[in-house]
Image: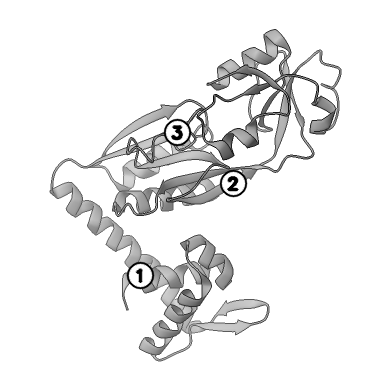
Amino acid sequence: MDLRELRYFVAVAEELHFGRAAVRLHMTQPPLSRAIKQLETDLGCPLLHRSAAGVALTEAGAVLLDEARTLLAQAEQTRARVTAAAGVATFTFGTLADSADRIGARLAAAYRDRHPGVAVRVREADLTDPTIGLRAGLVDVALTRLPFDVTGIATRVLRTDPVGVVLRGDDPLAGRDAVRADELADRPWFRLPEGSDQVWRAYWNGPCDGPEVRTVHECLQAVLWNGTVGMTTLDHVLPYGLVAVPLLDKPPSQLVVAWNRDDPNPLIRSFVRIAVAVHAA
C-alpha cells in the first residue's frame, strides 16, 4: 500500500461511486478503478461490493476506511511538522470579498489547532480576480466562487448557493417571488472590468452594461444610487433599502476551496480537508 492508493480508496469509499470519486480526485475513472483493484490484490480481499447502482463497502473495506483516514491524517501531520522544523512555516490564505464570513472563525480555529506552528497570512481580493492571486503565486489556497477559468487549478466545492438580482426596495420588481433576466434586459447591470477572467465576467455581468465595479460595496452603491441591477447570492446580508429577488434562469454559484493543481505543499491539502470538515459540521 502507498498513500496515493489510500487516498484513492478513501475517495471511493466516501463517495460510494467511482465516477464521483474520479471527479473529486481530478482524474479519469479507469486508472482509479485499476488502483483500487491493485489495492484489493495487495491486501488479498475485496474492499467493495460493486453493482449497477454503485458500490458498497465490505466489512474489510469499512475497517480499511477507518485505518486509511488515520494514516493519511498522520502523514499530513508528519509533513507539516517536518516543514515547520525546517523553519517558520508560512501559509497564505486568500478570500474573495465576504466568502469566508460564514465559516471564517471556525475554519481559523480548526486550522490553528491542527497547525499551531504555522504563520498564516490572509489576502483579500476585489472582484477582478476570482483566483485571488493563485496563478501569480500570491496565495497558497483561496476561498472563492465558481465559475471561472480553472485551467491548472483544482477546486473542492463546499456549498452551492442560488443567486438573485439586487434591487432597490422601491423597485417595481422588488416584491416579486422571482424574476427572469429578460425582464431586466433593458436595465443597466453592473459590469466587471475588462481584463477580468472571461468566464467569471460572463456569469456576473448582465445583458445590458452599466457602471464598472470592482468591489461588493461598489456594486451595492451602484444599485442604491443609480438603480443599477446587481447580482448576489441569496444568503448575502444586504444593507437597508436593498432586496434580493431570486433569478430563475441563472445557475447557482458554488463556494469552493481552490489551489494550484501541481503545488505539493502539504499545508494546502490539510487546509482543504479542514475546510470541508468545518463546513460539513
Q: Which mark is residue 228?
A: none
What is the quadrant of residue 253 in the picture?
A: top right
The residue singled out by tag 2 in the image is 159
Q: Residue at x 68, y 8 (%)?
A: 225
Along the viewing direction, whichever of 274 and 247 lies nearer the viewer? 247
Mark 1: which secondary structure?
Answer: helix
> Quick one: label 3 or label 1, which is nearer the N terminus?
1
Along the viewing direction, whichever of 269 and 259 lies nearer the viewer? 259
The residue singled out by tag 1 in the image is 4
Question: Can you give x and y, in whole percent of width and height, for residue 259 in the image?
Answer: 40, 47
Are the two marked residues, 3 and 1, in contact with CB atoms closer than 8 angstroms? no
Q: Residue at x 58, y 42 (%)?
A: 147
Q: Residues within 10 Å of mark 1 (few under 14, many from 20)?
A: few
Q: Residues within 10 Å of mark 2 (few under 14, many from 20)?
A: few
Amino acid under disc 3:
Thr
The residue singled out by tag 3 in the image is 95
Amino acid under disc 2:
Arg
